[in-house]
Amino acid sequence: MIMVTYGICLLTLAPVRKNPDDRSEMVNQLLFGDFVDIKDAVDGWYLIESIDDRYEGWVDTKQIQNVSEDSYNQLLYSKRYFTNDLLNECKLLHNNDSLLHLVLGSQLHNVKDGKFIIEDHHFKYSGNYIAADHPKKEIIKATALKYLNAPYVWGGRSPFGIDCSGFVQMVYKLSGIFLNRDASQQAKQGELVNFISEAKLGDLAFFENEEGNIVHVGMLLNTEHIIHASGKVKIESIDHNGIYDDQAKKYTHKLRLIKRIFEE
C-alpha cells in the first residue's frame, strides 16, 4: 500500500472499474471535478475512493490528475458549483484553448464568471452552473426530468448513460445532498415513509428481488408516479405493490420501502 494521496478527475468522464484492467466491468464513473483519495497504485492503475460517497474502484492513472494536499483541502472545502446543462463547452486556457465538453453535474470549484483554476490548470466554462446549497423539491424534480430517456448503463452517472442509483445520486447531488452510491446503501439513508399514500415529491422508493435484496431505486414524483432508470430513465406508474408497466400490463419491480431524504 502507498500513503493516501489526492487526485481529481479533469476529464469529461472516467470509468471506475472493479479490477485494474480495461476489460473489467465499470462499477462507477467520475465526472469532471470529482475528488478522490488515491489508496494504492498497481501497474498503471490507482485504487481510488470517491470523496463524496466513499465508493472504491480502479482508475487508469492517466485519467486522474494528482493534486497537493494544500490544493485538495482548499478546493474541497470551498463553495462547489455544478454544471446545469446536459452538455456544454469548457476551454482549457492553459492548453491553447482546447475544449472539454462537460456533462450535467460536473463540479466547478471557486468559479467566478465561468473561470476557475485547479493548481496550474486554468478553465473557462461557457454554460450554466448552480450553487448546490439550497435544496428545493421543485429543483430536484426539474433536474430529474433532464435525465429523461438517458440510456441505462451499469455504473454510469451521466445523461449519456446512467444506472438507477447513479440517477438518484446525481439528482440529489445537484442540490447539495450527497447520497451513497448503491441502492442498498441509499436505502439506509433518510427517514422511513410508512405508506405510499404518505409519499411526497422527491422521496426514494426501493425495490427488492426474489431473495429480498434491494436491487433498484427510483424517485417518486407523487403517490402514483416514479421516475427511474430501467432500460432508460422513464416515468412509470407505482402503487403499494411496486412499479407497473402500463404497456406490458404487469408489475416489473416489487416495492420494499420508501425513504424521505429531506424535508423542505
Image: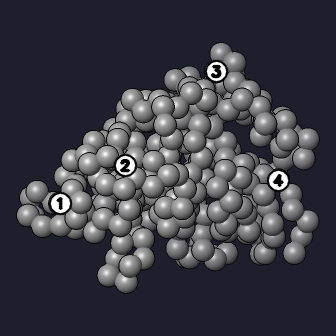
| Secondary structure beneath label 1 | strand
Residue under circle 2? 219
- Label 1 neighbourhood size at 10 Å, few (<14), some (14-19), many (20+)? some
In the image, residue 215 lies at what x, y percent?
41, 70
Q: Nearer the viewer, mark 2 or mark 3?
A: 2
Residue 84, image x, y percentages: 49, 30
Q: Amino acid at mark 3?
A: Gly
- Determine the CA span between mark 2 and mark 3: 31 Å
Q: Residue furthest top?
A: 113
Q: Earlier in the sequence, mark 4 or mark 3?
A: 4
Residue annotated with mark 4: 6
Tag 2–tag 3 contact (CB < 8 Å):
no
Which residue type does callout 2 highlight? Met
Find the distance from the CA under tag 4 to the CA under tag 2. Answer: 33 Å
- With 85 as the anchor, is 61 left or right in this view? right
Residue located 32% across and 81% down the image? 210
Q: Nearer the viewer, residue 75 or 235?
A: 235
Which residue is disc 3 drawn over?
114
Q: Is residue 64 above or below residue 92?
A: below
The residue carrying pointer 3 sits among few (fewer than 14), some (14 to 19) or many (20 or more) residues within 10 Å by Cα, namely some
Element at label 2: strand
Q: Secondary structure at mark 3?
A: loop
The mark closer to the camera, 4 or 2, is 2
| Label located before the other in sequence (4 or 2) | 4
